[in-house]
Amino acid sequence: MPSLLSVNVGKPKDVAWQGRTVHTGVWKHPVSGPAMVRRLNIDGDGQGDTNGHGGEQRAVLVYQIESYRYWQRHFGRDDFTFGQFGENLTVDGLPDDEVCIGDRYRIGEAEFEVTQPRVTCYRVGMRMGEPELPALLVSHHRPGFYMRVLREGHIEAGDRIVRTRTGPGALTVADTDALLYLPDRDPAKLRLAVDIPALSPGWQGSFRDLLADGTGGADGADGAGAAGGVARPAWDGFRELRVADVVAESTTVTSIHLTATDGTRLPAARAGQYLTLRIPGAGQPAPVRSYSLSSAPDTGSYRISVKHEPHGAASGYLTTGLRAGGVLEVAAPRGDFVLTEGAGPVLLISAGIGVTPTLSMLHALAAARSDREIWWIHGARGPREHPLAAEARTLLASLPHSREHVFYSAATAEERDRHGASAGRLTKDELTALKVPADATAYICGPTAFMTDMTDALVAAGIDPARVHTELFGALPAINPGLTGRTARPPHQPPGPPGTGPTVTFARSGISTPFPDGGGSVLELADACDVPARWSCRTGVCHTCVTPLLSGRVTYEPAPLEPPADGDVLICCARPGSDIVLDM
């Protein structure tokens, strides 16, 4: 009969780690006597990162004494104590390859239901002093599992564990964990998983995504979310494209038309994607920058529209120094901020130079003679800072169910009247007042604060958050679970003497630097440069850190449990095998 060996609790605390501070509750210690189990926790326990741990679906973490013995042999250690793996309940029995999602157990006065495997997280490796442990828990099929609390009550070491119900489908914890994190998934098991009511919603969503894209990969700091199928870029690395024309669109924005050097048609892009340019004429090392396509996505050529930023070496060269006939090094169109098919209303919302990807989407809708309801909503300072306005208006006139709302924040009444613009900035209140349809799909591009305000307004208006899409100009928001007390700094060169390894370029952040001689991973270099990065397990399991690799090649140490898609890289365990350019 399975039994409870120890009840372990611990409040979150700040722990020093690699020169930073992590707020974590992974340090658990045995409780003497009865402990009260409640819906969200055990009395005296807590979680430092509630996005990935805790809550109703992850109230109690279970780990087995058999796995303790396994890891003692694996690491050659004999210093383990109860709570060593961050678990609340150390048990004798209940192995991961026998316990099933949806199984219910009575322990003492309380009753529990198994909801999901343990989330892969770097903090268990930090607690154990074994950084590779998150990957090993998965690859060795010994993750442990979470339970939710069906009936509250007291439990105590020595209590028997009685199974009161078997979960439907007989999908074990180990099999569930492998479905998310390991390759060669069984589609039948994926279909089974999404129909198990007890499986936590995050994991159900991950498996639905994997079924939908047909390929899949893990993604997300809480172990929930799929990488999704993404088409391979039209070419690897950078290729030379010829500048066919340079056109001033406004006082600050210039369009650059690009064609193939051999006169052939360039591959079609998707409306909303971007190009990444390496620009030798703007300095050495050549700066690398990304710009959204502003043209129709399938014309055989590309157009980007660049705003001249004060003191911007790249934008300054592109808008004032570049001439027709010149050559630029360009990576293939990329990005998942793209127009999707559908029949419902479309909201294209932008501010300033954020108009470029939404204009590409408008081109695509016009080319398809779309009969969808299309809302074109844009904010600018005034007509002199409103590039491509006439082009947008012509496209809108060709669409039978379009409407336009333009806001000028610094224009005269005459200028507003001449261009049919409203006075003031495009704000959350102004957007709400437009009464956009609640069944719309929205695409938003502009400064970060603008996109946050527009998203909040749309969600408040009843639009499903899953149908609100945003595109950032700069680096993506970081995902760094558990880190605290960090002062935001702009990206910079790493401290200390420069390395002698291959050059690593973080394109969105504008940083190029030699890889350090001491080794480590690309993620560790990004950390040293304060380049915003996204990670969770840091051992090649969860795919949170997956990043487009624009050029170059990498090696892995350790090897990821599942390789990323072609054109992507897992920066947490990658090292440059040549000069590389990353979209971060």
Image (tube, rainbow, N blue to C red):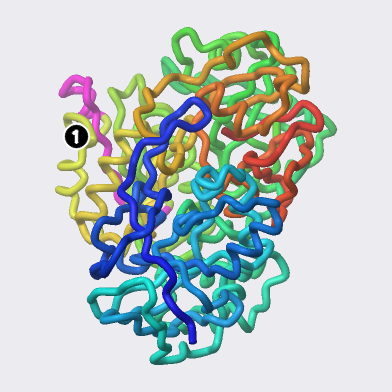
In this view of the protein, which residue sits in the foreground, 216 or 170?
A: 170
**Residue visible at 45% across and 55% down?**
86
Q: Is residue 248 visible?
A: yes
Q: Residue 38 placed where, x, y %?
A: 23, 69
**Residue visible at 28% across and 44% down?**
454
Quick check: 310 above or below 140?
A: above
**Residue visible at 56% across and 37% down?**
293
- Give the magenta part as a residue range: 399-418
Q: Is residue 441 visible?
A: no
Q: Residue 215 placed where, x, y %?
A: 66, 66
Label 1: how many Cα within 10 Å (few below 14, some 14–19, many 20+): some
Question: In the image, is 464 to the left or to the right of 534?
Answer: left
**Residue visible at 79% across and 36% down?**
553
Q: Which residue is mark 1?
A: 422
Q: Residue 442 placed where, x, y %?
A: 36, 53
Quick check: 87 above or below 200?
A: above
In this view of the protein, which residue sits in the foreground, 262 or 283?
A: 283
Q: Residue 380 placed where, x, y %?
A: 31, 28
Quick check: 72 above or below 165?
A: above
Q: Tally the numbered discs.
A: 1
